[in-house]
Image (cartoon, rainbow, N blue to C red):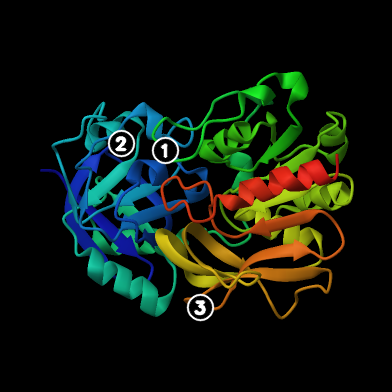
Amino acid sequence: MKVAKLALEDGTVFSGRAFGASGEVDGEVCFNTSMTGYQEILTDPSYRGQIVTMTYPEIGNYGVNDEDAESGGPHLAGFVVRNHSSVASNFRAQGRLQDYLAEHGVVGISGIDTRLLVRRIREHGALRGVLSSEDLDDASLVAKAKASPGLVGRDLVREVVPSQPVEWNERLSKWSKLAPPDESNSTAASRPHVVALDYGMKWNIARHLYNLGCQVTILPGTVSSAEVLELKPDGVFLSNGPGDPEPLEYAIGTIGELLGKTPVFGICLGHQLLSLACGATTFKLKFGHRGANQPVQNLETGRVEITSQNHGFAVAEDDLPSCLEVTHRNLNDGTIEGVRHRELPAYSVQYHPEASAGPHDSDYLFDRFWELIGAHA
């Protein structure tokens, strides 16, 4: 098989087997601890600019299918696995992982020691890297890795936002454990209108909002508050998305102008942007939280939720404004996982309650949004 190499900015070089598309990509090398859900990870726009390493050793064994996609296609820079299965063995499979990557131009590498790679990231922090099946010269690749721009200070949202508004009308999959939507709320006129600001939104979030009984209009995250309010929303949702939140001044300004005018609910990047709009600051985590097994405590109930996460930045507690109350906390490192405005109808969480892929422990957060909308109707 064709050789591929992954080089890190610290000079480490891994040699393995190329799979997927041929080519060369650069990005920040991160790792995800999920045992399943690789297609959801591949198609999550939040991974823009990143080379994703899966810690689970066998990837691709259940293939890929259209139903599990979280966007129109993969957004990550490159894909790293210990072993990729050339056989797709699942009754839902419509194709093989390696063919899916090749079709969408994603460069992959397999056959490397992913345990060693993850250990280096955990010890040294996030590292820029280059993945190539073309240039196999170690010195050249390391130099390219060092020249990679990384994530800090970049606006990656503009690379993944939709170009046009979308009226969403797709329900949750039949495989969801959740109850079907209330058919009495099935007409658009009777559904509360939620405007979702898309900074790189996973489709299962929109499915959850629609399943609640909401009319869902998706707008690019670059719109102004006037464009949002023109639609007379009953609530505004702030989506997940890629990269550093602090350069997104347009989004922070829009959210600040929406607070107090309508209920607001944010997830992941939306959580960071809501916090920034309230006067908070953010910082870059050493190696981020990415996986489907992150423990988070709900400080209101004491309950521990196992959550799906994908973020490399977090809200700083030292600079948290007095208007925000911490509602959830990560039990691994103590970072903020959720906030609520003390006076206005606005709250957010750092993790992904839409459970794609991941546990269903936190889906109550969508019900809370429904109740908040009803209380301010």
Residue type at the position of mark 1: Pro
User: Could you tell me residue 19's position as x and y percent?
Assistant: 21, 42
Residue 74, label in figure: 1
* Residue in view at x 19 percent, y 42 percent: 61
* Residue in view at x 75 percent, y 70 percent: 325
Task: Give SS at disc 1.
Answer: loop
Residue type at the position of mark 3: Asp
Q: Is residue 316 visible?
A: yes
- Real-space Cα distance between discs 2 and 1? 8 Å
Task: Give SS at disc 2.
Answer: helix
User: Could you tell me residue 239's position as x and y percent?
Assistant: 63, 45
User: Could you tell me residue 273's position as x and y percent?
Assistant: 71, 56
For the C terminus, the image quarter is: top right
Residue corresponding to mark 3: 333
Residue corresponding to mark 2: 101
Asked whether, in this view, residue 40 is left or right of residue 301, the answer is left
Q: Are marks 2 and 1 in contact (CB under 8 Å)?
A: yes
